[in-house]
Image (cartoon, helix red, strand yellow):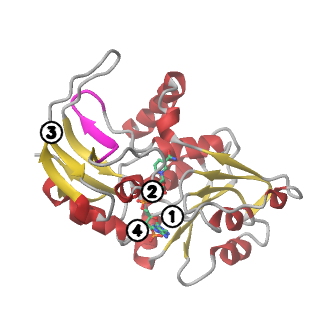
Amino acid sequence: MKALVITRFGGPEVLELQQVPDPHPGPEQTLVQVQAGGLNFADLLTARGGYPGTPKPPLVAGREFAGIEIASGRFFTAYFAHWKAGLIEKPAGTRVLIHAAAGGVGTAAVQIGKILGVETYGTSSSDEKLARVRELGLQHGINYKQKDYQDAIKELTNGEGVDAVFEMLGGEHVAKSVKCLRDFGRVIVYGAATGEPPVLDTRLLHARGTSVHGLWLSYLSHNRALMDLAWRQLSQWLNEGKLHPVIGKVFPLEEARAAYTLMQEGKNYGKIVLEIA
Ligand SMILES: NC(=O)c1ccc[n+]([C@@H]2O[C@H](COP(=O)([O-])OP(=O)(O)OC[C@H]3O[C@@H](n4cnc5c(N)ncnc54)[C@H](OP(=O)(O)O)[C@@H]3O)[C@@H](O)[C@H]2O)c1
């Protein structure tokens, strides 16, 4: 079969389309004829060798896919972030700050927030991207290149803060995100796109009773009951036309390097799809 192979650790230049041996599914595994792949920021980190647990190259790239037997799970992370923040069962009027609101997870999180009646605040490096996310229902866009998001949240919420932050940047942003919370708020940590290890002095959590929660879909995906529950809810919203997959750009698999470069430069919007002929 044809596969996109990470030949050594590095940038998009290390990717090569190669012929590799056909896979043979083991017990409790299934074979899927993959028709399209979704590019996840974690794929970039994997190619660089910076994603935890990555085996030594050469290895096959990619983690999201849609094929004949199994549909893509592109919305799960956004759904579980709302779930982990306790926003699924909370009354309307709660507030969430979504970092990288114009991204793959971000655009799904904004739409789910709208369905739940959550007030959404989102960051991006670009006014143009924020304008597009507003069309999906984002209520407050913050261009962090022009304004510090912590200051913006303070101003937009009359100094109160938000109930939850979806945090995927790492480094100083975990502590900064905690500072955006109001009493008993939660930061849901699910990535470190800056490549910096998250920094947090947990004493910051004491006074306001705030908390930090982790989220990793690769692990949760083994929990069949939880996945079924999420899938039923997401399917219902999709069928009702409330939730729309946001595909920013489609590349043929042969142009995977260009797709990775677009994401590396932060110019992506929604989900980048790699189409397999
Ligand atoms: N834990 C899990 O289960 C799980 C599952 C899926 C994804 N993730 C994580 O969730 C995050 C989003 O993934 P995604 O695939 O949806 O990516 P994405 O949001 O579509 O792309 C990343 C976006 O992050 C923003 N960004 C801000 N600061 C950045 C920086 N220093 N370096 C790079 N990007 C920066 C950029 O948007 P702006 O320019 O608009 O700011 C960029 O477009 C990633 O950290 C990924 O690893 C985790």
Q: Are marks 4 and 3 in contact (CB under 8 Å)?
A: no
Residue 12, horizontal then vertical, whole percent: 27, 64
Which of the 4 image quadrants contains residue 207?
Answer: bottom right
Can you tell me whether the CB of the residue at mark 1 lies under 8 Å from the nearest atom of ligand 1?
yes
Which residue type carries mark 3? Val
Residue 195: mark = 1
For marks 2 and 3 on the same chain, the one whose residue lies earlier in the sequence: 3
Q: Which residue is mark 2?
A: 50
First reached walking from the N terminus: tag 3 or tag 1: 3
**What is the x, y in percent for residue 150?**
68, 73
Residue type highlighted by circle 4: Arg
Amino acid at dot 1: Gly
Please state which of residues 218 and 56 is positioned toward the viewer in this rendering.
Answer: 56
Indicate which label's residue lies in the foreground, 4 or 2: 2
Q: Is residue 66 magenta?
A: yes
Mark 4: which secondary structure? helix
Q: Which residue is mark 4?
A: 132
| Amino acid bearing label 2 | Gly
**Residue shown at the point (82%, 61%) measured from the top left:** 204
Tell me which label, 4 or 2, sits earlier in the chain: 2
Taking the image as shown, residue 216 lies to the left or right of residue 28, namely right
Q: Which image quadrant for residue 141?
A: bottom right
In contact (CB < 8 Å): disc 2 and disc 1: yes
| Quarter where residue 146 is shown | bottom right
Mark linked to residue 86: none
State the separation of the CA atoms marked 3 and 1. Answer: 31 Å
